[in-house]
Image: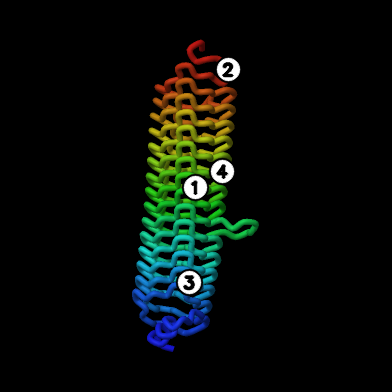
Amino acid sequence: MDAEELLWRYRGGERDFSSVDLSGFSLVSQDLIDIVLNQADLRKSNLTFAYLNRAQLLKTNLSSCKLGGATLIRADLQGANLRDADLHGASLQFADFRGADMTWVNLLDANLMDADLRNVNLSGANLSGACLRAANFREEKRSYNTNLRSAKLCRADLRNANMAGANLSKVDLSYANLTEANLKGTDLTGANLTGAKLTSAILTEANLHEANLPHADLSLAKLERAIVTACDMTGANLSRAIMSKIKLANTNLSYADLTDARMHHADLTRTILCYSTMINVELIEAHLAKTDLEDANLTSANLMRAEMSSASMVGTILTGAKMPDGRLYANV
C-alpha cells in the first residue's frame, strides 16, 4: 500500500489500517481523524501538520517520525515507539501515551495538557516550553514510574501535573512553572530548578540532593522529610513552606526568604543562611550544628529546644525570638 491508496481508502470511509507498512511515507497536512493504525510501521514517515485527532496508534512504530505541528488530541498512543520522533509544536491534549517509548523525542513547545504519561520513558526528551498542565505521570499501585532522566523541561508549564515518584534526576526544569504540582517521592537529584515556580507544590519525601534552585519560588510548598542536601538555593523563596524533618545539610540558603516557614526537627547542619530572612520561622528541635546564620534575620523566630551551640551568629537579628531554653532573646 502506498500513501495515495491509503488516502483514497480513508476518504472512502475505511478507517482500520492496523499493521500496515507506511514507513517513509509523506502524509503532510492530511486529514486522518479517527484513523486506526494499531501496530503499524510509520518509521521515518512525515506527518507534519497532519490531523490525527482520536487516532488509534497502539504499539505503532513512530520512531524518527516527523509530527511537528500535528494534531493528536485524544489520540491513543499506548505502547507506541516514538524514539527520536519530532513532535515540536504538536497538539497532544488528552492524548494517552501510557507505556510509550519517547526517548530523545522532541516536544519543544508541544501542548500536552491533561495527557496521560504514566510509565513513559522520556529520558533525554526535549520538553522546553511545553505545556504539561494537569498531565499525569504517576502510575498507581505499580513499582515503576515515568522516566524523565536528563530531559529538558526549561520553561515548561507543569501546573497541577501529577509527577509523584517520577525519575527527574538531572532534568532541566529551569524557569518551569510547577505551581501545585505533585512531586511527592520524586527523584530530582542534580536537577536544574533555577528560577522555577513551585508555589504550593508537594515535594514531600522528594530527593533533591545536589539540585540547583537559586531564586526558585517554593512559597507554601510542602517539603516534609525531603532530602535537600548540598543544594544551591541562593535567594530562594520558602516563605510559609512546610519543612518538618527536612534535610538541608550543606545547602546554601543565603539571601533566601523563609518567613513563617515551619521547620520542626529540620536538619540544618552546615547550612549557609547568611543574610536570609527568617522572620517568625519555627525551628523547634531543629539541628543547627555549624550553621552559618551571620546577618540572618530571625525576628520572632521559635528556636525552642533547637541545637545551635556551634552555629555562627555574628550579626544575627534575634529580636523577640524564643531561644532554645524557652526565654525570649530580649530577656537574655
* Camera-side mark, 4 or 1: 1
Circle 1: element type = loop
Question: For this rendering, which residue is in front, 11 or 255?
Answer: 11
In 3D space, how far apart are the residues under numbered discs 3 and 2 (Cα atoms)? 66 Å
Image vertical order of residue 326 relative to residue 72, above or below: above
Please provide percent x and percent y for residue 130: 39, 57
Residue 229 appears in the rendering = no
The residue that label 3 is drawn on is 55
Image vertical order of residue 268 relative to residue 84, above or below: above
Q: Which mark is residue 204?
A: 4
Tell me whether the residue at label 4 lies in contact with that at label 1, contact meaning CB atoms closer than 8 angstroms. no
Tell me whether the residue at label 1 lies in contact with that at label 2, contact meaning CB atoms closer than 8 angstroms. no
Question: For this rendering, which residue is in front, 237 or 289?
Answer: 237
In 3D space, how far apart are the residues under numbered discs 1 and 3 (Cα atoms)? 29 Å
Marks 3 and 2, the one that precedes in the sequence: 3
In 3D space, how far apart are the residues under numbered discs 4 and 2 (Cα atoms)? 29 Å
Residue 1: quadrant of the picture:
bottom left
